[in-house]
Image (spheres, grey):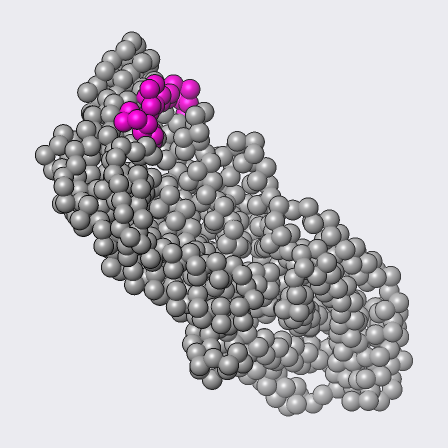
Amino acid sequence: MNTIWLIASGTFGEAMRRKVLLIFLFAGLAIILMGVAFAGLATQARDLTVTKSLGLGVISLAGVFISVILYITLIPQEIERRTIYSILSKPVQRYQFLCGKFLGGLMTVLLNIALMGMVFILLVAAKQWFQYGLNPGPAVLAISKGILMIFFQMTLLGAVAMFFSVFLSPFVNFFLTFAVWLLGNASSLTEALADPGNDPTHPKSAFVVGIFKVLHVVIPNFANYNIQNPIINPHEHITNEPIYIAWNILYAIVYTAILLTVGSLIFDKREV
Amino acid sequence: MLSSSRRLSLLVIALLLFIPIGFLQTQLIDPFYKKNYAPPKSKSGPSGLSLAGSNLPATFALGAFTGFREAIAGMLWVRCDEFFHNGDYDAIMPLIRIITWLDPHQIDVYETGAWHMDYNFTDSQERSDRRYIPLSVALLKEGIDNNEDQPDLYSDMAFVHYFRKIQDFPQSRHWFGKGWDVVTAKAVVDEKSDQHGLKDQINFDGADKGVMTVGHGYAHSLEFNGQEQEAVKQWQACLDLHQKLIAVKDGKDLSETQNLEIASKQLRELQGRLKYRPIDTKVPLDMGFRPQLVRVAPKVFVLQGSLNAIGAKKFVLETGAREFGPVDGCRVEIRLQDENYKLPDIGVYGLGSAVDPNVTIMQDAASVRAGKIGGDQGRKIDMSQDKDMYSFKAPRYTVTAWFAPNNPNDAPIQVQDRIGWLGEGLDPNQKNFVQTDGKSLLPGSVSPVPGLRMLAKTWTLSREDIVGAGKKVFN
């Protein structure tokens, strides 16, 4: 565990020095701050809706870019610079190296999302309090839940990118990870296609339904983590929401474990 | 390097982990997500899948799938407002469809969208375009389907739409009743909580506004359907909830006290009327309803004629002192529509929803002053300026002019004091008297009110009667 932690902390330090990630971080922060510009929208509800939705969307999108750019390069960069040889020549197992890299990347993503999240929460709280005289407490709590879900979505996305990075070039990995992310966000479509339906005039092929059922389970479901709607519409009350959040955290952890395990097995066989 | 057997066992473990993943996804997460977060697969609206496959622009679909649903919806709604101010109504309709799909919980889009369709798409004389009503109904129904626990949408459907616009009081009562069920369900009695020192502690959770908007409206709608005793009970139920709310709020909310006073005054007045109206409606009244339709130019008519309203010029409910005589304030409604037109039930508000350009409907109302419909000049109805709205494609048209005693717009309260809630005081032998016998005789597919007695006159006109030149009188 100590080995994993050492690799993780080294990865975190190195990742934080990478300017390309800072660009996404600052761009995200800038767009969130621009939310103030929407103060002139027609109504208070509309103004807050757009501000909250835009803020959460930007954190999510910036998080996606940070995660993908970071994770697709973590392993290939080590191979390209040949620094991996000096690490693997020490008593370090390849799975420890992979897990350490993943954890280091995750700490970087966490810090970035936390920074954007804090700025966004302060902005919304100030807007609610000073502009509209509303108690910011419930909104802050709701947005925190949204940011937590974004973080676990990025954990899963990072695991996907890291999995592909052990056998694909960063260029191919970038597009493939994005494709998986988009597909995983459209899970309501795969689920609908996996539904056999009950219309006798338009029967669905059992084979096709079966394929979509498998796809629906195998493709990591990123849409699970998009819980913005009730956050943005405070009159919507979701019963047992903490349980739903817990299921999704468990989902992210188990799915990440699968990807890291299979990734480690592939990496273990790979010639470096 | 791992041994082959260890590699195999790790691979098997990894693959086996898809079992809990599949269970989590399909059994726990999917049902919860669909219920609470997914774009609506509504009872009256399209599903996410079908909409994605039916001309939804890819940019919106992409936005919807990447966490920007509500931001896009918000910006589109701002754009809608610009279209409305520019009079580009056709552009608004599909935008509303996309916005409510992207964010099905933005109540104000349903409310404002339906309000625009009901009231604000007008001709040059500011008569609303009634062809939008089926769309408005479909949109509000979808809003209610997607937000079943929000009293505001029920009150919009019941009051803004059915009560004020269509004047369909049975439908208004129906939706107020459904909304009232929501309000009372929200006013949960929680006997365990006693932080205000009350036996019955209630968690209103947004129901407080609904007691006024839905509860009071429901009582009025019962009255306009001739269900006065039920209306009394409803006012009492409102009073009860207002009192509980005042207690919960420790009397700090002055508007709640005002609402209580309003409900209590309405109840007092209703009870007073229940006492005196059965007496005052006993003598049959001939109101001399003689509407006349005059074509003054092609597609231009004047509604004129007489309606002699008698009402309470003075009425002290407490003492019963009252005095009747001729009064102003009545209105006569008029509607022209294609012969045999029936309000279509479009069911689903879709991307391609639009008004039928071949249908012609005009509805207006004329106030009655000194017994003259439309005053000395009559009510001028000019349909010649708005060819898109009044296409006159049908060969024949039905024009109906009517006075409905249960409609507070037609018969103000002082007139109802003489003729009753359902026209009980009208002389059945007078000209143009109609005993509805539980059938709706009102155009516009208005639901029947059992026991309603009214005054109505119907003309059937040919297209030539409407577009022809010169003056022509229809008696």
Q: Position of residue B419 (x, y in %)?
A: 21, 42
Q: Nearer the viewer, residue B260 or A149?
A: B260
Q: Is residue B110 magenta?
A: no
Q: How many marks?
A: 0
Compare residues A250 and A167 and report the one nearer the observer.
A250
Q: Give the quarter of the figure containing the C terminus of chain B.
A: top left
Q: Is residue B370 magenta?
A: yes
Residue B1, quarter of the rendered image: bottom right
Instruction: Please tell me whether residue B394 is drawn above or below residue A118 in the rendered image.
Output: above
Residue B380 visible to an observer of this rendering: yes
A261 on left or right of B453? right
Q: Which residues are magenta?
A: B365-388
Q: Quadrant of residue A163?
A: bottom right
Whole-percent x and y of residue B137? 37, 47
x, y (%) of residue A116?
A: 76, 64
Residue name at image x 48 percent, y 62 percent: B257
Residue plotted at (47% across, 79% down):
B198
In the displayed structure, B81 sits above or below A50; it is: above
